[in-house]
Image: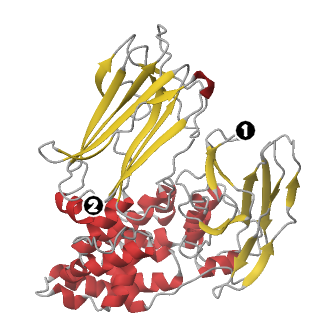
Amino acid sequence: VIPLPLDILEEIFLNLPPQDVVCVCRLVCRQWKDVADSESFWRERSRREGYYLRDPSKVPSNWRLFYFLCKKRRNLIKNPRAEDEFRGWRILDNGGDQWKIEGCMVQHSNPAVKKNYVTSYGLCRKQQLINLMEEGYSPSFMDEFQPYIRISDWYAPRWDCGSIYEICVQLLNDEQDVLQEFRPEPISFPQWNDQQWNQMVHVFKDYGPGVRYVIPLPLDILEEIFLNLSPQHVVCVCRLVCRQWKDVADSKSFWRERCRREGYHLRDPSKAFNIPLDILEEIFLNLPAHMVVCVCRLVCHHWKDVADNESLWRQRCRREGYNLHESSKVTSDWRFFYFMCKKRRNLIKNPRGEDEFKDWKIVRNGGDGWRVEKPIAQHPNAEVQTNFVTSFRMCTKSQLIDLVKEGYSQAFMDEVQPHIKVSDWYAPRCDCEYNMSVKLLHRNKRVIEKFTPGTIHLPEQENHRWKQMIHVFKDYGPGVRYVYFEHGGKDSVFWAGWYGIRLTETSIELCPALDKQNYEPYS
């Protein structure tokens, strides 16, 4: 390496992306490392990019950490717009008809907001606990710098109903004692209001040292975790979290052990992992399931045995509420059972007609034939914006679902016999008829069980209102490999055009676990 004057080298680094400075430049030689680690370099970088201290008396001892936390400023609340249902939230109170997620009745000032949480007539509260250390804010940074903590929450009433809004935000120390609290008086809205969105904002300042929620890990377990991360992740991410993590990432014993493991292949890799089985299983239970399967089980035979253990997945199912319908029908593969519960989904393709008739087989196309239109009456699910329409002679369409192709193994279907929930929504326009037929088929297409209710006649007085047909297949025995679904209808007054039954939001779901949702139809 050709030596460069320090001021020129620093100027070059100041014009490179910060991740290149940390992940590439500082690894070249000792001189480059000294420049990349110098406080003056990161202080200058902060100055040039406009990251200024609010209080000159509170100077961070780690300017690099200060720079990256300014650079990566983000919302620490998970799932703030209900895009992932209630993921990330803990429900404290679920009164009345409970929490619900709906589309916004009045457009939010941020057009990206499409959904919101809705409370009911009994008290509804939900909570998140943010671990600042896990989010990358080290105890030393929080104590020395005490960055402003800005809270923002949007709320709106319904125009036709009075309501009450409450908020509480607390700053906690490592023992979860309250250091500071923001709890304004409840805000009441009368009936017949303008239902506009309002914003609640509060900023915590000068709250003193100690704000964090820390769960320290023993050094041997922490080092073991680092040994199984990529080295660049250890250097560029882990060592910036806090002083404890930095000391482990910089220790000679850590890198000596890493060299030994990667340079001399152990005959028995399991001897290198001294984490007790119960602790290792508890760690796996708190990791995302896909990471346990795709990462952890590839580390060594010891970790693979834990990741493949039936007791691990049985315990995971229990913790996440995936309980068997019947204790007599026990699965031989708890991992498969877990993922089938986790990935439960609608097996009907294109259920709303958003892709015209893609994936549907037209069985009968009477009158003026099938058509796709917008709903005349709003569907209970605000996301439904299209429906299929029949004509003045019989129109029917079908789908055949191959359960093995959808990921449900033959052994799983025969052992567990998961409930098969069928749901279909229909609405009349004038006098109409509605038909539906569902069949469970053997591999040779022989009918094992079927649900074929009689023709439903809907008079014009029904006034376009949506109805739901629901059926659940249970205890159907072994051998089910396909589900055949067919529905349709016509108008009964023989008007030219499309005045027949309207159909949308068809679904077929396999429910391996006890279903928390209601099986009762909507009417």
Q: Residue at x 41, y 75 (%)?
A: 318
Q: Residue at x 43, y 20 (%)?
A: 490
Colour scheme of this structure image? secondary structure
Q: Residue at x 24, y 55 (%)?
A: 408
Q: Position of residue 13 (x, y in %)?
A: 47, 59
Q: Separation of disc 2 and disc 1 at Cα?
A: 44 Å
Checking the image for residue 417, the label placed there is 2
Query: Is residue 247 something one can see in this rendering?
Result: yes
Please, what is the three-letter code of the amino acid marked with disc 1? Val
Q: Position of residue 494 (x, y in %)?
A: 46, 10
Residue picked out by circle 1: 106
Which quadrant would the N terminus be assigned to in this image? bottom left
Q: Is residue 392 left or right of residue 193?
A: left
Q: Position of residue 260 (x, y in %)?
A: 21, 85
Q: Is residue 477 above or below residue 62?
A: above
Q: Residue at x 22, y 84 (%)?
A: 302
Q: Residues within 10 Å of mark 1 (few under 14, many from 20)?
A: some
